[in-house]
Every structure is written in C-alpha cells, then in structure tokens.
Amino acid sequence: MKLKAGLLPALFLAAGFCHAGKPEVLPVPPEAAAEIVANDMRYNGAPMRIVQFSTLDADETLKFYREHFVRYAKEGKYAEKSSNRRKMIGAMMQDKRIVNVEMTRKNKAAVHVLVSSLDIFQMEIPEKLAGDIPRMPGSKVVQHLDSRDGAKSNRFVIIQNNQSVESNAMYLREHYLKAGWRRDRDETIQLARHRQLGFSKDNRQLLVDVQKTGQECTVIHNEMTE
C-alpha cells in the first residue's frame, strides 16, 4: 500500500493525560461504512491507526465527534479548526492517545472523513529511526512513517536541508547505484525546483521526490517492499 503525505494527521493537540476506561480504538458513527487505511502503522515510532469513510450529513457527523470527545477526551475538552473546505476536530483521549478527525468536502453532497489515532508518548526521534537513509550533511529528518499490510510494507521518510535539488539528486543517485539499485526513473519535473528519482532492487521499489521551496529542500523517500 502506497501512502501519501495527505493521509497524515492534520491536527495535533497538546494536553495532559490520565488513566480511565478505554473507548473504541477509533470512533466511527455506527451508520458509517469505514475503510481501514492502515491498521499496522508507526508514525515516528508511535503506534498509529487510520480509517476513512464518507458521509452525506456533515453536521450529524460533527455532532457525533463533539459528543464523543466530551465523553471520552481528557477533561471532556477538544479543539476545532476550519480551513477552506476542510474542518478538523481532535482531542487528547483519557487513554493517552490523540484522536484527530479531518472532514473534507468532496462535492456538494458528500464529505470525506479521515480519523486517526496516535500515541504520542511512544514517539521516538525520527533521526534515529532513519539512520540507514542516505542524506546530505546538514540534513534533518522531519518524519518517519512505517506501515504494513500483510506481506507488503511501506516506509515514508521526509528529510529537509538547505542544499540544491540537483545536489541532493546527485548524492542520492550515486549512493543507490553504488549500493546495487537499478535506476528506473530520473526526471526533472521543474528545472532547479523539482526532480524525481526511482530505483528498484529485488522486491523493493523506491521513489525519491526532491523539491525546493524558498531556501529549503525537501527530500521524500517512499520505499515499498512486497
């Protein structure tokens, strides 16, 4: 399963915690036909789950989550945020998980709902988790995401530095070719601003996306193993 950055939690809320009765792992309205996006996932080392569904009644769905958080969140508190066609609501639960709900309008009738949970108290430093990922000196690992779906696995790592797109591409190209990977893609999307590299080795496939925004360069490693 290939994961995209847009599937990551959109809202993280800081709060205290305490022990209490454990509600369902991911709250979903009883009438919703929820699809599990990832049941075995770790975000910066912490257990994470994501489900998604669509609804024709956004107001009723929002009411469901407000009532759920009043009942199960730490001190019954939650936070809401709206941006364009998107609404987010989330809270720190009594069992120490953060639960976030992102509602995005698909069309005039339907709303797409993404629900995620994350145990932030188990998070690790992403730099340590990505110790084997090649990167230029001065780079910072921003995010490390692992997921599994049966025999398939996906690793999604975001790295940032102040180097140029071509310097990053050259560095990574040299590393993977020397390590025995086959180059399947080497394409300039936008001159000096965006390049994509693709490599494969045995049952592993890797897509590296390198983009420049201002003075900062973002390198995304997306590795899939079957």
Image (tube, helix red, strand yellow):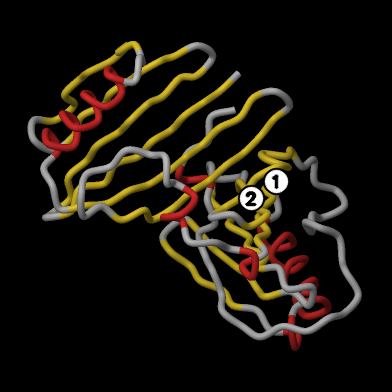
Q: Quadrant of residue 134?
A: top left
CA distance separating discs 1 and 2: 8 Å
Quadrant of the frame with the N terminus: top right
Q: Earlier in the sequence, mark 1 or mark 2?
A: 1
Residue at figure coordinates x 63%, y 60% from the top left = 101
Question: Which residue was labeled with disc 2?
Answer: 113
Q: Quadrant of residue 69?
A: bottom right
x and y percentages locating residue 40 in the rendered image: 71, 42
Question: Which residue was labeled with disc 1?
Answer: 51
Left or right of 167 in this view: 187: right
Residue sitting at the far bottom: 75
Tell me the SS state at disc 1. strand
Residue at figure coordinates x 88%, y 69% from the top left = 22
x and y percentages locating residue 173 in the rendered image: 23, 24
What's the amino acid at mark 2?
A: Val
What's the amino acid at mark 1?
A: Val
> In this view of the protein, which residue sits in the foreground, 122 or 89?
122
x and y percentages locating residue 106 in the rendered image: 54, 42
Residue at figure coordinates x 22%, y 18% from the top left = 186
Q: Quadrant of residue 127?
A: bottom left
x and y percentages locating residue 184 in the rendered image: 32, 11
> In this view of the protein, which residue sits in the foreground, 106 or 172?
172
Left or right of 103 in this view: 51: right
Tell me the SS state at disc 2. strand
> In this view of the protein, which residue sits in the foreground, 146 or 129?
129
Crowdedness near tag 2: few (<14), some (14–19) or many (≥20) residues, C-alpha within 10 Å: many
Left or right of 72 in this view: 57: left
Residue at figure coordinates x 56%, y 79% from the top left = 14
Count of numbered labels shown in the rendering: 2
Quadrant of the frame with the C terminus: top right
